[in-house]
Image (spheres, rainbow, N blue to C red):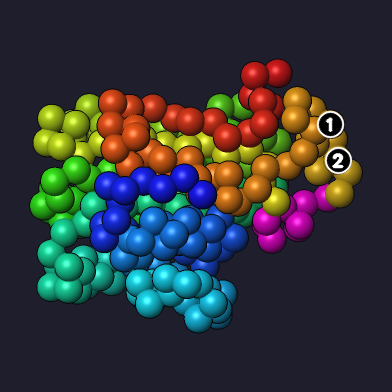
Amino acid sequence: MYKYNDLNNKDVLVTGASGDIGLAICAKFLEQHCRVYALYHSNASDLDTLKSSHPQGENLHILQCNLADKEAVIALCQHLTEKVKKLDVLVNNAGIVRDSLFAAMSLEDFSTVIDTNLLSTFMLTKEALMLLRSSDSAAIVNVASIAAIIPSVGQSNYSASKGALLGFTRTLAAELAPRGVRVNAVAPGMIESKMVKKVSRTVVRDVTNSIPLKRLGKCDEVANTIVYLSSSASSYIVGQTIVIDGGLVMR
């Protein structure tokens, strides 16, 4: 583990914290001795396990929030304002997939993915903005996907949401950089996770064969990049998307 001393005692908000990548993000920030506020929607069991097992688990604060509910998001940010008065890092990691070929995709499946992956990010970032601007050196990291960059058959809704997130990242970065808030994004490729385990083994094998490193990525590799983008080690990186895919996109 690389130690970023400037992250010590920083306040970090992570959405989608109960998923495999979210758990890895929380664990890595805990290793940096951050106070981590981990948001989940419906199941906190894995977060409870992380809290009880991690050496810095006392710094993990588990919060339930439906990010699609504007009033719940407002209440969350009011709670954080009263509790910590600032945020140093916001990691917008929450996201869902509802895959099907475009011809068979329903409007509900399209709009639900857009609402969760894009509009919820807008709402939370908007409500958390004053908390972030109260920090001396705040950072926002949006978790996109290589589906925003290359075709992903059966994911027109997911690709649209993640592609829009990259545009959102660049414009938000331009607006907030003069106010001391850096905004960047990461675009993971196929990562070893519960979500990928639901994908056909044939598809996983074909994708793995197309990756120059000849393996899937690890959740820790995504989390390490997010921690780096949140630290002073990346202090001159603004409005960028770091692709974490083992070289797949370059092919």
Q: Is residue 24 visible?
A: yes
Which residue extends farthest top? 251
Residue 65 in sight: no
On screen, residue 161 versus residue 87, left or right, reads: right
Pinpoint residue 104: horizontal percent, then vertical percent.
69, 47
Q: Give the residue drawn at x 80%, y 33%.
A: 214
Q: Which residue extends farthest right?
A: 202
Q: Amino acid at mark 2?
A: Arg
Residue visible at 28% across and 32% down in the picture: 235
Question: Marks 1 and 2, how far apart in space?
Answer: 6 Å
Q: Are marks 1 and 2 in contact (CB under 8 Å)?
A: yes
Q: Is residue 69 above or below residue 107?
A: below
Q: Front-most of 56 and 75?
A: 56
Residue indicated by mark 1: 209
Image point (41%, 40%), residue name: 228
Position of 91 compared to 97: left or right?
A: left
Q: Disc 2 on helix, strand or loop?
A: helix
Query: Label 2: which residue?
Result: 205
Please state the horizontal and vertical placement of residue 6, each as a whole percent of the image: 27, 47
Camera-side residue of 30 and 108: 30
Magenta stretch, residue numbers: 193-200
The residue lying toward the viewer, choosing from 131 and 227, is 227
Which residue is found at the position 45% from the left and 53% from the top?
Answer: 93
* Quadrant housing the C terminus: top right
Left or right: 38 as drawn, with respect to 43:
left
Say which amino acid is labelled 1.
Asn
